[in-house]
Amino acid sequence: MKERLFSGIRPTGSLHIGNYLGAVKNWVDLQDKYESFFSVVDLHAITTPFNPKELPSKIKDMFCEILASGVDPEKSTLFVQSHVKEHLELTWILSTLTNFNWLTGMIQFKEKSEQHAENVNLALFSYPTLQTADIALYKAKVVPIGEDQVQHIELARDILRKFNYTYGDVFIEPKELITESKRIMGLDATNKMSKSLNNYIAITDTSEDIFKKLRPAVTDPARIRKTDAGTPEKCNVYTSFHKYFSDEETLKTVQEGCTKATIGCIDCKKLLHKNMDQHLSPIRERYLEIKSKVSYVDEMIDFGREKAQKVASETIKSVKEVIGLW
Ligand code: TYM
């Protein structure tokens, strides 16, 4: 029997290079090894301000982008979180075991409360308990994520350990799986790439748009003139992008050219653009094709819901039994 894996992504806008490299690309690589559950976590997305008119298309677009990236709905279970009501049921039960002080220490809560000071709501505060329920419903052992989510998985372990200690061993303590691309910086080289900071390249951006965004991207500050030598490891274009999109030969050319000042930043970006576009254009094309097949997408959403619901309802049944709610 394969071990179970769970991961989720909020439908807050386009899939960008950051969450693609930090999460979704790994999902594709891992789906053969694990029994995988991937979710478009719309219930998480509504904890920060959103537009109800745009939400349905954002959910579907994210679903299509994940399919286009290579998640296979036959191998994995890909579903929309709010379609499986057990996520909310288990969240309530796990809330009774989530220590208030544990939640006050969450970095993401602090960041989001500052970003959305006008709406610091209860759901934003208890967000990590919902995330724990997501993982626990499928009894997942492995959770592939970017670095910013590690603290939430540590908390998930605490909550589930407390559950098992209190009511008996129902859950598996999950473990995060992070890779080298665990924290992709934005084009500003200062902040993590994110939609809200507008420092991103979307995986469905056109070739021209990608270059328009790359052209002003921040590089090694030492390279003011073309003749100034630089250090690739100090250049975000190299560390966040070239490293993941370029082959060994290009990396060598860029490293040498940068340290010896024989290649300018713009030529380095042109090489990157070519490689990035080569990687992303098949995804972009698949995305447009999938998106145009409206009934296929709806069918896949239903298919995913059915598969997820089956596992989730079994878990909830056993949870209710052990806590005396049956
Ligand atoms: P979200 O939607 O912010 O991001 C989805 C995944 O992408 C990773 N990520 C990044 N990795 C590297 N560099 C970046 N710049 C970058 N930006 C995002 C995130 O770490 C994440 O793995 N709370 C989660 C969603 C969630 C979840 C779960 C994840 C809900 N339930 C259960 C795992 C298990 C979130 O907001 O991710």
Image (cartoon, helix red, strand yellow):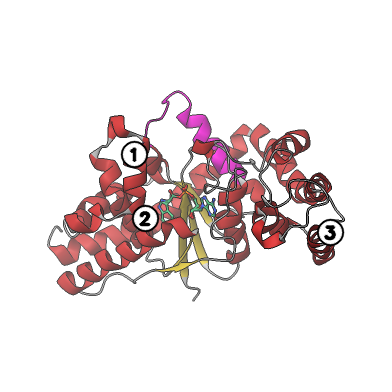
Expressed as whole percent of the image width and height from the top left, the position of residue 205 reads: 69, 37
Q: Is residue 185 magenta?
A: no
Above or below: residue 58 compared with residue 139 = above
Q: CA distance from mark 3 to mark 2?
A: 47 Å
Relative to 183, is 118 on the left or the right?
A: left
- Choose mark 3 or mark 2, whichever is in front: 3
Whether the residue carrying mark 3 lies under 8 Å from ligand 1 is answered with no
Whether the residue carrying mark 1 lies under 8 Å from ligand 1 is answered with no
Residue farthest top in this picture = 53
**Picture quarter containing residue 169?**
bottom left
Above or below: residue 275 compared with residue 176 = above
Q: Earlier in the sequence, mark 2 or mark 1?
A: 1
Which residue type does callout 1 highlight? Glu
Q: Are marks 2 and 1 in contact (CB under 8 Å)?
A: no
In the image, the segment drawn in magenta is 46-65
Expressed as whole percent of the image width and height from the top left, the position of residue 319 reads: 23, 62
Q: Are marks 3 and 1 in contact (CB under 8 Å)?
A: no
Numbered badge on residue 24: none
Q: What secondary structure is found at the residue carrying circle 2?
A: helix
For disc 3, the marked residue is 257
**Picture quarter containing residue 295?**
top right
Relative to 308, is 106 on the left or the right?
A: left
Tell me the crowding category of disc 1: few under 14, some 14 to 19, or many 20 or more residues within 10 angstroms, Cα based.
few
Which residue shows up at 61% across the image and 32% down it? 294
Relative to 238, is 50 on the left or the right?
A: left
Numbered badge on residue 114: 1
Which residue shows up at 59% across the image and 65% down it? 180
Which residue type does callout 2 highlight? Asp
For disc 2, the marked residue is 134
Q: Which residue is at the front of the view, 308 or 205?
A: 205
